[in-house]
């Protein structure tokens, strides 16, 4: 199941990368589409679209590689002895300290 999720997200990234790089849909770039015209003049839109498109292609490749790698290595990964998950004392202490911090932040509201 996780392989299909990785592949589906990789395909979406490939489509978005194509739209940004080759179709120059700069409105898909966060921050650039909401920038004022004075700020947009500072940037080379063609180079920005090319960079973001290439970045999406690389991310799609890495995600697809991870999905295929997981499908190949899944039979060799060690299986847990039981389905019950127990937390170590360290992780329990960290989780409780995070909970205390969150409660302190919201108690002052």
Image (tube, rainbow, N blue to C red):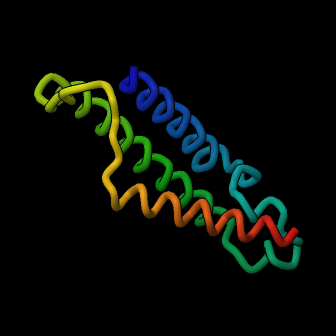
Question: Is 23 in front, or is 95?
Answer: 95
Question: Where 77 sits versus 18, above or below?
Answer: above
Q: Quadrant of residue 76?
A: top left
Q: Position of residue 69 (x, y in %)?
A: 23, 34
**Residue drawn at the location 42% of the way across and 28% of the way down:** 7
Q: Nearer the viewer, residue 32 or 69?
A: 69
Q: In the rendered picture of this protein, how many numbered marks are placed on residues?
A: 0
The picture places residue 65, in percent across and down from the top left corner, at 29, 38
Q: Check the picture and name the quadrant holding the C terminus.
A: bottom right
Furthest residue toward left: 76
How far from the left and from the top, in percent, is residue 22?
59, 45
**Residue situated in front as seen by the camera: 45 or 66:** 66
From the viewer's perspective, tell me whether residue 82 is left or right of residue 35. left
Where, quadrant-wise, is the N terminus in this rendering?
top left
As drawn, is 79 to the left or to the right of 35? left
Residue at (64% x, 62% y) in the render: 46
Q: In the rendered view, does 104 fall on the left or right side of 79? A: right
* Residue drawn at x 76%, y 52% as measured from the top left: 27
Above or below, 31 relative to 1 = below
Which percent across, then down, holds residue 108? 84, 72
In the image, 70: left or right of 78? Answer: right
Identify which residue is drawn at 55% across, 33% down.
Answer: 12
| Above or below for 85 versus 106 | above
The image shows residue 1, relative to residue 45, as above or below, that is: above
């Amino acid at each position: 199941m996780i392989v299909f999720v990785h592949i589906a997200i990789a395909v979406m990234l490939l489509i978005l990368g194509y739209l940004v790089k080759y179709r120059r849909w700069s409105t898909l770039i966060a921050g650039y589409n909401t920038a004022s015209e004075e700020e947009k003049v500072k940037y080379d839109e063609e180079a920005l679209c090319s960079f973001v498109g290439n970045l999406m292609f690389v991310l799609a490749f890495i995600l697809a590689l991870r999905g295929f790698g997981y499908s190949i290595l899944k039979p060799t990964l060690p299986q847990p002895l039981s389905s019950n998950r127990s937390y170590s004392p360290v992780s329990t202490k960290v989780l409780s300290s995070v909970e205390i911090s969150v409660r302190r932040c919201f108690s002052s509201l």
